[in-house]
Amino acid sequence: MDFEQTMMELLINAGEARSHAMSAIQFARKREWQRADEALAASVEAAKAAHHIQTRLIGADEGVGKVPVTLILVHAQDHLMNAMLCRDLAEEIVLLRKEIFAG
């Protein structure tokens, strides 16, 4: 496994997940519900791809420190966790906006 390439893929997918989540919020603000839902779905798919990479890294580490903990790995993990939190919050914000605008 090329760890540097793997870290970059993790970063890219996590960043994409966050970007789509933020787009969903912006679409909801404009009442573009279908586009908001599509952006949330794209965020979920990007997060799944990032999580798959994370799982491969955990498997390669085997719980014994085989994967070197570098600054880029820590940065990639931080991006993934932020993306996941952002997506969760975006889902709630979109739902809240739908409720507000429906009533």
Image (cartoon, rainbow, N blue to C red):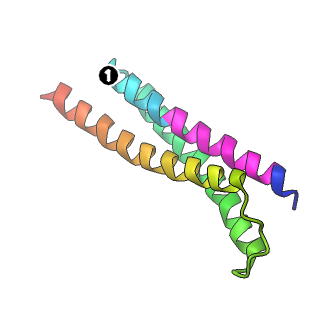
Local secondary structure at mark 1: helix
What residue sits right under mark 1 in the picture? 29
Classify 25 as above or below 92.
Answer: above
**Mark 1 surroundings within 10 Å by alpha-carbon count, few (fewer than 14), some (14 through 19), many (20 or more):** some
| Front in this rendered view, residue 39 or 90 | 90
* Residue 61 percent across, percent down from the top left: 75, 74
* Residue 16 percent across, percent down from the top left: 60, 37
Left or right: 14, with 37 as reference point: right
Classify 20 as above or below 75.
Answer: above
Name the residue: 83% across, 49% down: 5
* Residue 53 percent across, percent down from the top left: 70, 58
Q: Residue furthest top?
A: 30
Query: Which of the 4 quarters of the picture holds residue 37?
Result: top left
Left or right: 70, with 32 as reference point: right
Q: Quadrant of the C terminus?
A: top left
Type of amino acid under label 1? Arg
Name the residue: 65% across, 50% down: 76
Label the magenta part by its dominant secondary structure.
helix
Q: Quadrant of the N terminus?
A: bottom right
Left or right: 54, with 47 as reference point: right
Name the residue: 67% across, 66% down: 55
Residues in magenta, as a range: 5-20
